Amino acid sequence: MVEVEIQSSGKTIALPFRLALMTSEPPKRVHGLSRSATNASLREATAMESALGIRDEWLRLAAQGSQMGLWYWNEVTSELFWDAKSREMFGVPAEGEVTLETFYRALHPDDVERVTRTWRHAVADRQPYETEYRSRRPDGTSRWIYARGSAYYDETAKPICMVGVVFDITERREIEQDRLDLSGRLIKAQEAERRHLARELHDDFCQRVALLATQLQIILDAVGNSRSKVSERLRELLKTVNEFGAEVHSLSHSLHSSKLEILGLSRSVSSFCRDFSKQHKIQIDFHQTALPEPIPFETTLCLFRVVQEGLQNVNKHSRASRAEVRLVSSLTAISLMLRDNGVGFDLSQNYASNGIGILSMKERARMLNGTLEIRSSPMKGTEITLTIPLKNVHAAA
Ligand SMILES: Nc1ncnc2c1ncn2[C@@H]1O[C@H](COP(=O)(O)OP(=O)(O)O)[C@@H](O)[C@H]1O
Ligand SMILES: [Mg+2]
């Protein structure tokens, strides 16, 4: 087999790739590397050589025609190689030496530490290296880069080199960012609308219902508290009006986040679960571990809205008799788990077309760099897990 060999600690190690791939022209001589044919007759080697030559040519053409850059890092000699496309992405001249320093200079300062960490972990854990970061070009522009690589090791597990590719994903990141901005604005608009509705309900409807109840009471008092049909009807009417008033009041509170601001997350969730359980006759068990203080309000609001939306779904769709709400916190994240013992649903079906509840839960999570996972299957109930990092390391994380 034709192999690329590399010298490490005086030994020769075969690598299953050809450096010819990395350059637009096959290299005549590359420092630290030599190529040899071993374990094969000359004819076989020549045939293999020409087959590999064709494959190299295909790959070179594919790389040239795509938005993919190639790179190679020699851990032993500390040499870095970038092909023309990589150089273009990092804003480095087409000719001349590139070193590790060139890479660090071309990297956005905010991403240096994370990229180094990811790289070192990948090499130490013998895992593929994969990350996204920003390049900073000399003309001041910046590009988003997706990088992948694999390391090669000698028999003592010492890393020898890493080969990889980079893609310019700026457009994709911009589209994602636009989408995120849009959903962020929609959710903010939804919150503003809710606040407006809550205020209308509280200041107008609740006042009018209270007035109606007072007037009914006055009439009832005037009729006399007798057992006559009229006073019976009036008493029933007064009860209905009071119940209606209480419902509008609680609706206005569930729409508005002011109570949440005053009570904080755990008391609001616990009180919401209690009221919801009473109102809908579903047993709801609420548990929590000690939560950190203070939790950013946007995190609190997200968790609370997911509890509300999740429990609405339990009531509306699950036919569950029991649900469980759990708030768990660690040093780095806060998680909400919401589980019911209902009929569940098929996640492979397009459930998102039914409504916007789950979609908006996901968008809320995404806006805070969190994740929302749903596990559900018919007849086995549904489980939603929302996790939000407590320190929001933005997009670059
Ligand atoms: N806890 C649940 N149990 C059973 N089905 C659920 C549950 N939560 C969501 N679903 C399913 O997922 C769909 C989408 O939910 P959602 O996005 O909140 O929209 P909506 O509640 O308006 O239908 C629901 O229509 C229902 O079929
Ligand atoms: Mg819903």
Image (cartoon, rainbow, N blue to C red):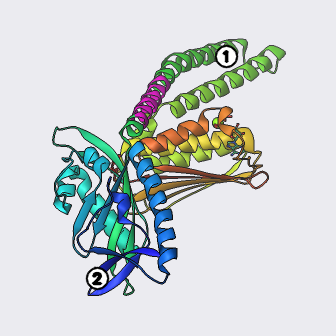
User: In the picture shown, does residue 174 fall above or below 207?
Assistant: below
Q: Which one is in front in this view, the residue at disc 2 or the one at disc 1?
A: 2
For the point 61% across and 14% down, the residue is 212
**Which residues lie in the magenta part?**
175-194
| The label number, if any, that marks residue 272 in the structure image | none
- Whether residue 289 is situated above or below residue 7 in the rendered picture: above
Q: Viewer-proximal residue, 348 or 97?
A: 97
Q: Amino acid at mark 1?
A: Asp
Look at 24% across and 57% down and name the residue there.
112
**SS at circle 1:** helix
Q: Amino acid at mark 2?
A: Ser
- Taking the image as shown, residue 327 lies to the left or right of residue 263, namely right
Q: Which residue is mark 2?
A: 8
What residue does disc 1 label? Answer: 221
Query: What is the quadrant of residue 237 in the picture?
Result: top right
Q: Name the residue: 27% across, 64% down.
A: 28
